[in-house]
Image: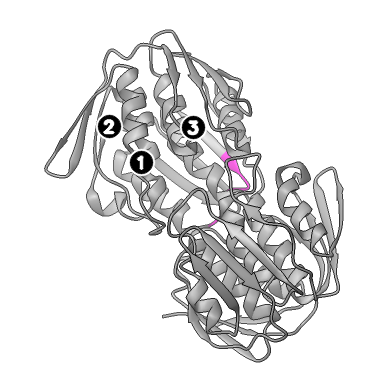
Amino acid sequence: MSQIIIQGGERLEGTLRVQGAKNSVLPILAATILHPGQTVLRGCPHLSDVEASIRILQHLGCEAQWEGEDLTVNAAPMGRWDIPDHLMREMRSSVIFLGAVLARFGWAEMSYPGGCELGPRPIDLHLSTLRRLGADLREEGGRLRCAAQQMEGREIALGIPSVGATENAILAACGAEGETVLVNAAREPEIVDLQNFLCAMGCKVRGAGSSTICIAGRQETHDATYSVMPDRIVAATWLSAVAAVGGEVELEHINYRHLSTVTAALHEAGCRISGGEGKIGLRSEGRLRAISAVRTAPYPGFPTDAQAVLMAALLRSKGATVFVENIFENRYRHVDELRRMGADISVADRVAVVTGTSELYGAPVRATDLRGGAALMVAGLAAEGETRIGDIQHIQRGYEDPVRDLRKLGAAIRLE
C-alpha cells in the first residue's frame, strides 16, 4: 500500500494552479446523462471519485474518454437505469445519479451510497424532495426502486439547505413537466457551477447562488463544452500549508471570493493575504497566533471541508482556538492522528480546542477520511522529522496529485 512521506520544516514558495473542483465535477458528471449526446468537460480533475463516476456512467451505457485534462462523455447509447451496489458504495456522491437517471428515463434502481464515514448523512431529504416531484420511491431488499414517469414541477421548500439534496432536486426537475421552484436551496459555488453547466447544454435554470432556484423542465438539450470551476477546498489546503510552515505562494485559477471566510481566518492568524481576479496570494512567517472561534456553516459560512486543514495550520500557533463543527458529527476523526504528532487538541462532542504547541514531530499516521488526510499533510509539512501517511486512498479521492503540487512549492515529499 502506498504512503506519502514528508520531511517537515521546508518553507514553501512559488506559484501553483488549482485543479478543477471535485464537489463540482461529480454532480456535473451525473448531469451529462440528461443530454443524449456529447459533452466535453475541460479541466476535469483526475480523482478516484471521478473514476468512480465514470464507472457508473459506463455501466449505464455511456461512453467516456480522457484527452489530457479534458473528459468527453457521450450519453447517447445509455440504455440502463440500474446501478449495482459495488459502484454505489465507492462514494457518497453516487446518490446524485438518482435525480439524473429519473429525469432521463423515469425509472431508477440503486442501493444506498458509500463514501467517507463522517457520521449520519441520511438521504431522506433527497427522497422526500423527489417524491414531491411525483416520484414513487420504495426500498426493497436494501435497494431503492424508483418510478417517476409523470414528474411535475412545483414549489419545494427544503428543510435544510443540503447541497446534495439541492443538486438532486435540480437534476430531477430538469425532467419534470413545468417549472420547479426550490426554496431554502444550498448556495455553494458548486451549485452555481452545476447551473451554468446545465444552461450550457440547453436547460433553463436560474437563481443558483441564492436560496431560491427555478428550473424549467423538459428543455431541448444540445452538445456542449464546459470548463469546471477551480477547487476552493484544495486552494484552502495549500494556503493552510504555507501558513503552517512559512513562505509565500500565489495560487492561480481560483476565485478569491469563494474563500473569504478561510482567508479571513488566516489573516487573523497573522498571514498576509492578497487577492485579485483569478488568484490568491499568501505570505506567512510560519508561527501563527490563535484566532476567534471557527464555526462551520453552509455557504457563505466557514466550509466544513476546510475545518481540518485550518486546524492543522494552527497546531503551533500562540494561544488556543475553538472549533465548532455544525455540519457533520464525525469531522474530528483526524484529531487522534494529529495527537500522535504532538498536537494539543481536546474534543467534547462538536467542539474542539486547539492549544498551540512549540513543536510538532513527524510520526507514522493514517488518513481517516479525505479532509483529515489533507490535514495530516499540512501538519507533516510543519513537523520536525519524517511523517509517513498511510491509507492515502482517502486523499486521492479529492487531490489530483498532492505530491507533485507540493514539490512545486519546495516541499520534501514523496510517494512510496
Q: Position of residue 136 (x, y in %)?
A: 22, 23
Q: How far apart are labels 1 and 3 at the CA level?
A: 23 Å
State the residue in front, 415 or 289.
289
Q: Amino acid at mark 1?
A: Val
First reached walking from the N terminus: tag 1 or tag 3: 3
Residue furthest left in the image = 141
What residue appears at the point 71 percent right and 75 percent down from the top-left corner?
Answer: 407
Query: Element under label 3?
Result: strand
- Position of residue 247 in the picture relative to residue 71 (left or right): right
SS at badge 1: helix
Residue that sits furthest to the bottom in the current view:
385
Q: Is residue 42 magenta?
A: yes
Residue at position x 80%, y 79% in the image: 11
Name the residue tied to disc 1.
95
Task: Report if residue 221 is visible in the image.
Answer: no
Q: Nearer the viewer, mark 1 or mark 3?
A: 1
Q: Amino acid at mark 2?
A: Gly
Is 103 on the left or on the right of 106, as rendered?
right
Quadrant of the rendered image containing residue 273: bottom right
In the image, residue 183 sits, relative to residue 78, either above or below, namely above
Residue 106 visible at all: yes
Residue highlighted by disc 2: 79
Per the model, the C-alpha gap separating discs 2 and 1 is 19 Å
Residue type at the position of mark 3: Gln
Display colour scheme: one colour
Q: What residue sits right under mark 3 in the picture?
A: 38
Q: Residues within 10 Å of mark 3 (few under 14, many from 20)?
A: many
Q: Of residues 366 and 327, which is closer to you in this image?
A: 327
Asked whether disc 2 touches disc 1, contact meaning CB atoms under 8 Å apart, the reply is: no
For residue 194, above or below residue 413: above
